[in-house]
Amino acid sequence: MEKVVAFGTSSGGTLALCLGFDVPKPVKAILSLYGAVDFSNPLWKNNPLPELKAILPDTLTSDFLNRVYTEFPVPTDSFVSLEGQTDLSTSSQSNDQGERKEGPPKPNFSLPRDAFAFTHLANGTILDAIYPKGDVKSFDPLLNLSPSFPPTYIVHGMEDTMVPIELNKRLYAGLQENGVECGMIEVPGEGHTFAAKMEVGSRTWDLQREGFEFLDSVLRR
């Protein structure tokens, strides 16, 4: 198992990056699409998202949200993903030919897990909610860079408001400072979780492919 790479989008990108440090055997290479990083940045304490706040029901209460702490068995997944959720107006989209295409499932606000996640994301309080200790070094890739960090490629949308591209620019700069083989592509016109709705053959598709070509080049050595 010498040729294992890690890839993820959004929080999955963060998890992929976390396989580059504090593990018995780091992966061979990493590709992160708009993964969240730089958790000591003040932005994580105050980054409300109006586009998400607009779809929150007025009926949500603290008591209901806090049911996530007492649910049994403890929920470990959800039918809803953040992929494609930056446009929450509809669960389906039209392509350039006018054909309808089903989008990702929308949050079910009758479930405490969905309500909790989207409320804290909308209010910019997600980090305090899920990790109130505040010691972020154990899971922040930016604070764990070293010359031995695996080759890493970053893909990020230039219009991302949920995880602003500046955070990953800092990661990219840190990788370069440590002499890590790395690359970064900035995707024009794209926000967070664009991978869920990109069209094969589009400019976005072609740009993000550079990350996979990077992984391939490392594996072929």
Image: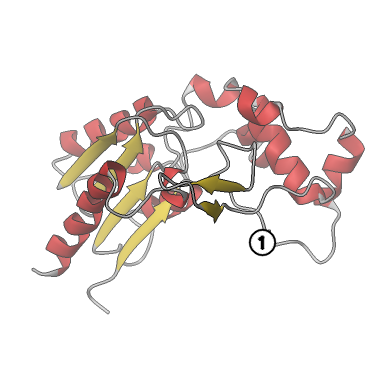
Tell me residue 211's x, y (percent): 24, 51
Tell me residue 209's x, y (percent): 24, 53
The kind of residue on which mark 1 rests is: Asp
Q: Residue at x 86, y 29 (%)?
A: 58
Q: Is residue 115 above or below residue 51?
A: below
Residue linked to disc 1: 77
Q: Looking at the figure, which quarter contains the N terminus? A: bottom left
Relative to residue 164, is residue 102 drawn left or right?
right
Is residue 214 in sight in this rendering?
yes
Relative to residue 153, is residue 78 drawn left or right?
right
Q: Residues within 10 Å of mark 1 (few under 14, many from 20)?
A: few
How many numbered discs sit on the rendered protein? Answer: 1
The residue most toward the left is 221
Q: Quadrant of residue 189?
A: top left
Tell me residue 192's x, y (percent): 46, 37
| Figure coloring | secondary structure
Q: Looking at the figure, which quarter contains the C terminus? A: bottom left
The secondary element bearing badge 1 is classed as loop
Q: Is residue 54 above or below residue 6?
A: above
In the image, 195 versus 161, the foreground residue is: 195
Is residue 149 in sight in this rendering?
no
Q: Residue at x 67, y 59 (%)?
A: 79
Relative to residue 166, is residue 61 drawn left or right?
right
Q: Quadrant of residue 19?
A: bottom left
In the image, 25 versus 80, the foreground residue is: 80
In the image, 7 versus 110, the foreground residue is: 110
Relative to residue 60, is residue 205 drawn left or right?
left
The residue most toward the bottom is 1
Q: Residue at x 89, y 42 (%)?
A: 64
